[in-house]
Image (cartoon, coloured by chain):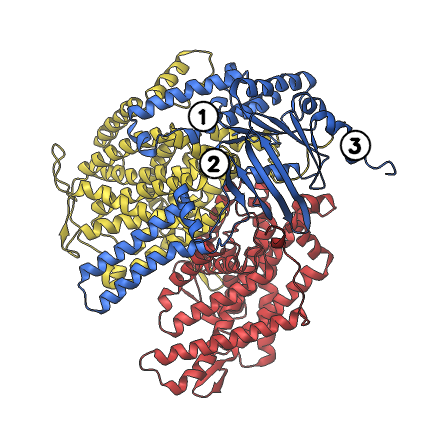
Chain colours: A red, B yellow, C blue
Amino acid sequence: MIASSVTTPRTRSGLNRSARIIGFAVGAIVVYVVLLWLALQVVDGFAPERALPVAIQQTINALSIGAIYALIALGYTMVYGIIELINFAHGDVFMIGAFLAVVLTGGIFGQTGGVKDVPFLALLLLVALLFVMPLTGGLNVFIERVFYRPFRHASRLAPLITAVGVSFILQNLALLVAGSGDRAAPQIFPLDWQIPFGGAEISVLSIFIFALALVLMLLLQTFVNRTRLGRAMRATAQDQQAASLMGVDLNQTIALTFLLGGALAGAAGVVWGLRFGFVRQDLGFNAGLKAFTSAVLGGIGNISGAVLGGFIIGFIENFASSLGFSRWSEFLVFMVLTLVLIFRPTGILGQQLGDRA
Amino acid sequence: MSAALGRLRMDGGWRDRLVRASEAHRSITILVVMSLVSSLLVVFPNFNVLQGPSGWYDAFANAGVFVLLAMGLNVVVGLAGLLDLGYAAFFAIGSYAYAYSNSPFSGLDLPFIPMLVIGAGIAALFGIALGAPTLRLRGDYLAIMTLGFGEIVPIVFLNLDKWTEGTNGIGGLYRPEALPILGEFTPISPFPYMIVSLIVVTLAMILLYRLHDSRIGRAWMAIREDELAAAANGINTVVTKLLAFALGATTSGFAGVFNASKLTIVSPDQFLFTVSFTVLAMVIIGGMGNIWGVAAGAFIVYMIQAVFLKQINTVVENLGLPAFDLGPIHVDLLQINFLNYQFLLYGFALVLMMLYRPEGLFPSRERRAELHADEEAGEGAEVVGAMGGVPGENVE
Amino acid sequence: MTDVLHAVNVTKRFGGLLAVHDVEFTIPEGAIVSLIGPNGAGKTTFFNIIAGIYDPTAGEIRFRGKRMIARSRRAWLEPLLWVVPALAVALTTVLVGEAGASDIVIALGIFFTVIALMIVMVVGVARPPAYADFLTRFGVFRSARPNDMVVAGLGRTFQNIRLFANMSALDNVLVGMHSRLKATWLDALLSTPRDRREEAEARARAMQLLDLAGLRKRAHETAKNLPYGDQRRLEIARALASNPVLLLLDEPTAGMNPRETADLTKLIGRLRTELGLTILLIEHDMRVVMGISDRVTVLDHGERIAEGTPDEVRRDPKVIEAYLGTPAA
């Protein structure tokens, strides 16, 4: 009885890893389309023949929202992985990124609406990303340096409270500068670029956002897995003490983690404005909560988990809004968080360890 | 009787003797001090400084609400070391409980004093419902769960407009019945509210100090110091934490009922994250873990916000700075209501406190020692699970 | 002599590392048993399994004849059990509501759903013994937690002292007494006579324990300000406060000078003779081990390589090899 419970290593399937991931992703998307299609049949006053195209259209939108959450969630999960701190200010770094994008495209370039000139649009987007990402990354590093580093060896409560304080400061600084209420964000990516599809229209912007996020995530994955600095990050996440004994510069590695997290949040901020057309000072709070839920759902500390969690949250939220319950989406996300924490506190891809001690 | 009794040095002196006597007869001391404070608060407004008596009494009554909230949150954050970021949710639940029991909306008119207890009890139930699944997990998950809960509760009250009247909230709540001696609760004379608020604060303080000095209070502090060691000494950490959490929720619900009966309207926007944050800032500023310190901190912070921050607008108007533009952003100081930026102030106060004076303005003895421990000697609290022995020990 | 503790084929694996492998181990009542072995032999891991901090990968711990710790089984079922009764009530409410019941019935249904959910969740969190027995009926087994082991009669100290550093010595001992005190939060709020009596008694007994540990004069000092040797003894006093049957001491003389070590050895001997305790000792100092142990078990690389009286173990070639390395090495 006892000897049999010792686990044997599972035999590996012949498929390689990326093929399996792509297969899983495609499968999940198809399942979602079918689910939504079935659900839409039930909604009152909805033409059944439009259900499938609309389901596909909504799925693309869900992917773009999920991509935004995933980009933010990556910052949460990397920081938690490395210093075990819930960086409450992270959502607000994203919000600052969204504001910076508005300042650049609207303020400096004077754009107000869609830019049909493709090369110019590409240039604008590139400039926006190159402008916002280093700034939010730098802001995140600054926050770590000034507010979190003094607490590196202190109790867990002190840095957590400080993080909440920093979040509050950022939010209120934005309030002070920009005032309360929605501020229009120039949607330089033309919204009327739509691919007509059997009674529904698929937004090119959504596809763009999804693709952009995918590229950034692949870059991150490559960086973390293939480079010396990435290796240092993984080592530090595993065991800070051992890593520093092996010659990893802790301060540099932690700063790098914050830089990457902040930059990704900045990219999310840029596309947020394109997608939703407004920015507001409390943006970071709501998006942050959802992104954090994504990170926990996927297994906090796990990079692939954050991405998976982000897309799941995107799907859940999209499902609610497609069926006309969008004002309950926060509630739904919170319920998901609760259930995950009850049944699988380490998340979907998280390791099951040490929850008893 | 008091746990702190012994911690005094044995060097005598009138001050030590006074402290020792006060700690041995805690409840009596609180009664004496609070009646002194009360008489001061009753007399002072009559000098008409800055505003008339009824303005002061009103401010004091509201301050009582925040003192109560801060003392309750202190049990959770200061004593048990759990970060609760959704404290306003329980405040909301208490408030709505009163709204349902005393309004034309529900058609009920239940007596005030029992409602204080019932509202607090309902908040406690919600506290348990939120705490039970989460408190088994690591501490930081509680922070995010409470943050989410604090966010969700106003949303639910907003969305269920059929039962809550949505954004407008439930208005026209009935005021408490007249009490003997104090007389009628009216909008013009907030004096009875202030007295009730003082009584409730005093009572809460006595009860919280009793818990603090008891077996339960010791267990809270033990968990805060070292959760694993606390478990290894027979403390059921989850139940003990849950008790702290539920007690915090109870206090918050209590304050909610009182506040609703005073405002006579409840609406979702009264219970946003800013309230939770303000109370947290009060606890930190006052000195986590120290009950009277937190109460004093909350009182001071509230008075600064309610009385002195109001004056800033007048000052800025007199400065007359011109408006200017930053890209698409238009800045005009005259258009800004500085009362809105009190939260920026709280944010900075909180962060600076944590960085430079984590024990707060009025620290408790244990807390001061703890928070400055790292500077004195890096106590390496190693993971127990680490294998092997002490390096370089004698092995035959 | 009956066994206080019986470890049955305990194995613990951390990822790829086999920290404890198939260890069979008993502690007879009233004995002082020592567990020795080179660094990294798995002693502390084994100790932490007994104390309820880790679940073993395989095997089980029987404490005073009852199975207390083993790999948890069907743990996923437990949260389901919490939710199912509440869902049942909720579903009934919905059905009754659809059937056209009055608002009051529906309100009552919601109320009972919530209450049912709360009760099961709180019981699930508190985990009283009756609840554990209930769970076994569904084939759910969850190991005793550290605090359950204390209630069952186990006291322990830590290898690297883990006192409540900012509480006084007296308060530390009083915390140790926690599981034996009965005052509830309500007693404390109302300051009932029972609460006051119990508190006074607890204080008196805590002072006795401090006396035993030679710390009476330092009762009111903050724990972290005590000298090292005193901290070690305070930790023992705190462990004794729960009236344990079995006391686990994890390297109690680590970092002590010879005089302190000798004093502590004497104290451990007194614990057995005066308090009738059974003691499990992890120790590096062979003089201590050989001087007071009835029986010694040697672990190396997570496996038990020898067991017997101190003399037998001292002469065992395998033990000599484990400590000195093979002649070739």
The spot of residue B197 in percent (x, y) is: 24, 36
- Report the amino acid beneath label 3: Ile
- Report the amino acid beneath label 2: Ile
> Residue tagged by mark 2?
B223
> Residue tagged by mark 3?
C320
How many other residues sit within 10 Å of disc 2, few (<14), some (14-19) or many (≥20)? Answer: many
Any part of residue A325 in sight: yes
**Does residue A127 appear left or right of residue B20 in this picture?**
right
- Report the amino acid beneath label 1: Leu
Discs 2 and 1 carry the same chain letter: no
Displayed quadrant of residue C81: bottom left
Name the element at disc 3.
Answer: helix
Displayed quadrant of residue B175: top left
A99 over B95 or under it: above or below = below
> Residue tagged by mark 1?
C174
In front: label 2 or label 1: 1
